[in-house]
Image: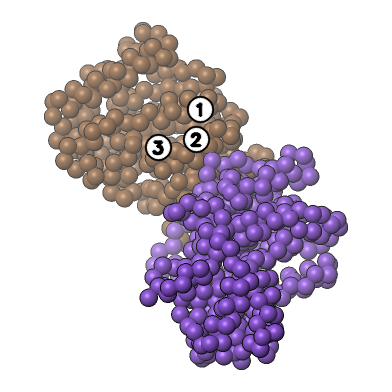
Amino acid sequence: MTREFISGNDALAHGVRLASPKVISAYPITPQTTVVERLSEMAEDGSLDAEFIHVESEHSALSCAIGASAAGVRTFTATSSQGLLYMAECLPYAAGGRFPIVMMNANRSIALPWNIYGDQRDSLMLLDSGWIQAYVQDAQEGLDLALMSYRIAEHPEVSTPFMINMDGFHLTHTYEVVDVPDKESADRLIPPFRPVGCIDPGSPQNIGFSAGPEHNVFFKYKAHCGMLRARDVIKETEQAFSRIFGREYSGLTEGYRCEDADHVLITLGSISGLCRGAADAARAEGIRAGVLRIRYMRPFPAEETVAAVSGAKSIAVLEKDISFGGTGTVFANVGSALFSAGLNMRASNYIGGLGGRDISIGDVRKIFSDMAAGKTGVRFIGIEEGPE
Amino acid sequence: MSFSASSLSEDEFFYGHKACAGCGGSLAVRIALKVLGEKTVAVLPAGCMSAVGFNFPQLCFANNAIISTFAGTASMMTGIEAGLRARGIADYKVVGFAGDGGTADIGIQALSGAIDRGDDIIYICYDNEAYMNTGTQKSSLTPFGARTTTTPVKGNRRDKKDMFEIVAAHGIPYAATASVGYLNDYMRKVAKAAEVKGTKYIHVIAPCPTGWGAGSDETIELAKEAVDCGLWPLAEYENGEFSLSMRMKDPSLLDSHIRRQGRFKHLTSEGLEHIRELRDRRWDRIDKKWNVDQGRRTR
């Protein structure tokens, strides 16, 4: 193991290197670019025994990764924003084919208007594409998840592609001190890729077929079951990770002072640390505040969320996303989980950080005050008037 | 290497499918796989051949085969080739079978990328000159004058895109045109492509009786005539040079060839004249650019 002062993208590239994918296909887009620059360097200097394929588009990046995965090897690609949307057709294709591809998405705003900075509308728009979706909060978690993702995605009962989301610039381009594991330890975590149902010289396969109305539902049901199975495999993988590397992760969510909280703020990604600081400040002023960080949006942590907030008087969801005319996507998922569990507390949805706009600790502190004051509804941080 | 019906493998790799009677595309796939053999991975995008051959649980390829996205034939082939190589499986070929729309319209970007990278794949475009799987809509390889369901009154107003020359302009190691009417020539070209390192492209004209308005027993004749009357020159491109594979037999066959097809039924004599002009202009370009001996044009 070495300790290095590197960016989030560099950390993620190290994680991918340690997982030893054989085929990497990628197309450049800000702010993902330095991930694939690092990986192409590694492929050229021999520190990574992989073929780096310079595809001509994001659609081809994922199509190529699907082909390589179908041929029976471990693959990686990375993208962001418009690139993710351009390859969108291939996302459910990879999920439906049960190809355990790992992709890093640098969360970035969606045009129009054009904007290269971070928000989460890109990946949340594709929440239903059948991919495991994880959201990291720092560079170390990015590296660690790059490693763990392969073990989770390739688990024979999961066999589902994995999207690691890192907030554009806030995480991808921020330098932090990161523990970079050695290859030997990484190999202990990730067994060699044993593909199932792939192209086979000994027993020819017809892959990626059509299935009509009679059979289609069974394939969809199996994919759903694979995703649900990932809940336990994520926990098992984190336990194995902790035994090897000594770092603990907390499954689909991470709670902070939720146990006795009256008001729980639910969020995801790099803003979580700031939210924890705001919760401390709110508690110092008498508001019993807590923060629940969602680490995985798929599989969705319904049970964990319900357990974390069941004693609270109110919840709010802070997300860098809005589904126009509705609510934020995270809020819609959280609301569904709480309603299904029979919980009926006050709930509000704060939309912030769109197009990379800064969210200050004061903004989050105000969310806790609003919650304590009984406010509800969908609010945009930085816009005083409500939308209605 | 020469191929004929007598020397061709008895093995079948594409059978039990639901293609229409007289389908030229399914013949192109079947014959190419017989030439390439079992150590072949076939990639087929959305289109006729995947629609007729890949319906769970009735799967019709005896070799390894996969459906790609419509736009992603070439890029999926790239991934499969790289993946097999990474696994140390060196003696396998990756062949793609995409239609005219899948190649010249939605798939041209991925195809161009693969040729640019020099990926070691064989891309076969079976050209039935419209989106036949969805019921005969115009593609960029629909010829001038042909009526489709999206050019329903006057017929298509544009000439076919010249995919062969577009592909050659990439500096591809090997490209060829072929016809299911001249199977020996097609088989020879597929076999040659299998021997060449890098990206290979074969564009085979494959009549669709359903979409062309012809009898199911006319496929081979139509495919022969298209070559014989000069509408579809059989050629090769290798080492930076174009060469003709066969002479235009009889330019006067054009009229009857066009008139026998239902898709040209509405065509005026001016329209037919324009098709003749397009053909002649093409041959003038071929003569100048390809440095072809005039004597080879007609018998």
Residue B170: mark: 1
- Circles 3 and 1: CB atoms closer than 8 Å: no
- Place residue A256 in its image quadrant: bottom right
Which residue sits at x=79%, y=54%? A5
Q: Colour of chain A?
A: purple
Q: Secondary structure at mark 2?
A: helix
Residue B104: mark: 3
**Is residue A11 in view?**
no
Which residue sits at x=31%, y=45%? B132
- Circles 2 and 1: CB atoms closer than 8 Å: yes
Residue B170, given in percent of the width and then of the height, sits at 51, 27
Which residue sits at x=36%, y=16%? B285
- Place residue B199 in its image quadrant: top right
- The amino acid at mark 3 is Ala
Q: How is the image coloured?
A: by chain
Quadrant where the image shows the C terminus of chain A? bottom left
Q: Are marks 2 and 3 on the same chain?
A: yes
The subunit letter for the residue under badge 3 reads B
Mark earlier in primary sequence (3, 1): 3
Who is closer to the viewer here, A198 or A384?
A384
> Mark 2 = which residue?
B112
Residue A299: mark: none
Mark earlier in primary sequence (2, 3): 3
Against A210, residue B139 (above or below) is: above
Residue A20, given in percent of the width and then of the height, sits at 74, 52
Chain with brown colouring: B
- The amino acid at mark 1 is His
**Mark 1 Cα-neighbour bin, 10 Å: few <14, some 14–19, many ≥20:** some
Report, in whole angstroms, how far the alpha carbon at label 3 lies from the one at label 1: 15 Å
